[in-house]
Image (tube, helix red, strand yellow):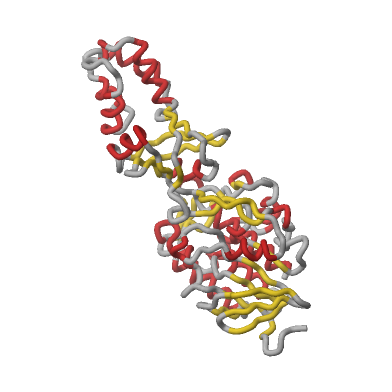
Amino acid sequence: MTTHGARSYDAIIIGAGAAGMMCAIAAGQRGRKVLLLDHGESAGAKILISGGGRCNFTNLDAAPEHFISNNPHFCKSALSRYTQHDFIAMVERHHIAYHEKALGQLFCDGSARQIVAMLLEECDAAGVEIVLRCSVTGIARRDNFELESAAGVFAAPAVVIATGGLSIPKLGASGFAYSIARQFNLAIVAPRPGLVPMRVEGDALRMCRALSGVSHDARVSCGNAAFRGNILFTHRGLSGPAILQISSYWKPGDSLDIDLLPDGDAPQFLLDRKRTRPKAELKTVLAEVLPTRLADILAQEVPARGAIANLPDRSLHDLAARLKRWRLAPSESEGWEKAEVTVGGIDTAELSSKTMEARAVHGLYFIGEAVDVTGWLGGYNFQWAWSSGWCAGQAL
């Protein structure tokens, strides 16, 4: 029985972000009476700040191997049923101009606000009711689900949790999805910050501070994972695309290996310059392939001074090894405040890969960042939101 006075819907979606809005659109288009709730002031808050305000809304290469999960196969069904091309088609229907950057990343020519406006327009066309500034204070399961909220009591046979993870708490991120999972005895893969800058200590920190603001193309690896891209030295450690990518694989205690010459044979380069530019200083030689400030610092670490001709081959080989494999152990990440995504979340073993419904709790769904599926940097996490949200919407 439904509590007297509760307003009834076919489905209630909690969280008006990327996944929640897509789910509401898909369900509304199928004739479902849908309520979309969010505790924030506006829908799509995370969309608005993404991509420097231009929203990197998907990636042309949104394949399963670009996602992290305890079950790497889980995301395959959703990604194949609602693809990046499906979302691009929606963008084009709304006449939103976009462009491709490196590695298949698609951005709005204008503003991320265009994506939010598009989703809200689609929600409106699908008859979705949206209630903002509405915190859900409790969920009970009787014949239907009953939600207590700041706006009253709502009831529905299906509830979708689309409240995301713990990243960027200033935008309202919370552990709500995990609380609901625990309430219904669903397992959680321990969440940790992903796509996040790294902090270092000691000599490495002194070096990073001296180089703060310097950027350089490198290959960064941690275990079996490796990414090529810019690294950025900061006053706390390292950032930049390659560092953000590898951070999603890093765990406390792990070391990072950084190849500062990913396309070069470092020993051959240094020995060749010793022969062809014998009078050049080492820092001058290194500046051919490294930023000047980085070249200066690395040259200072070599005991001998003066012309490169004066350096023994052994010293050059040692320096070459440092260039190809600079190893450092981050002390920690910069945490949830700086993390773009959450790694971990609702254990995929608890969910249907086709519908996102909890196997043990009929009518309860989890989508988007709340689930243990995390994409690489570059539009992949938005595609997971679109795909998982659409799939749940088809099942409501």
Q: Give whichever of 325, 61 is nearer the camera.
A: 325
Q: Give whichever of 135, 16 is nearer the camera.
A: 135
In the displayed structure, does residue 27 sit left or right of residue 247?
right
Where does residue 307 sit, x and y in percent of width and height? 22, 15
Q: Quadrant of residue 109?
A: bottom left
Where does residue 262 sit, x and y in percent of width and height? 44, 29
For the question of whether residue 220 can be seen, the reply is yes
Where does residue 373 sit, x and y in percent of width and height? 62, 52
Q: Quadrant of residue 110?
A: bottom left
Q: Residue at x 73, y 67 (%)?
A: 395
Q: Is residue 36 above or below residue 112?
A: below
For the question of whether residue 32 can be seen, the reply is no
Q: Residue at x 66, y 74 (%)?
A: 139
Q: Residue at x 61, y 78 (%)?
A: 128
Q: Give whichever of 181, 340 is nearer the camera.
A: 181
Q: How many marks?
A: 0
Q: In what quadrant of the picture does the C terminus appear?
A: bottom right
Q: In what quadrant of the picture does the N terminus appear?
A: bottom right
Q: Residue furthest bottom?
A: 5
In the displayed structure, does residue 185 sit left or right of residue 377?
right
Q: Residue at x 50, y 38 (%)?
A: 227
Where does residue 90 sit, x and y in percent of width and height? 57, 65
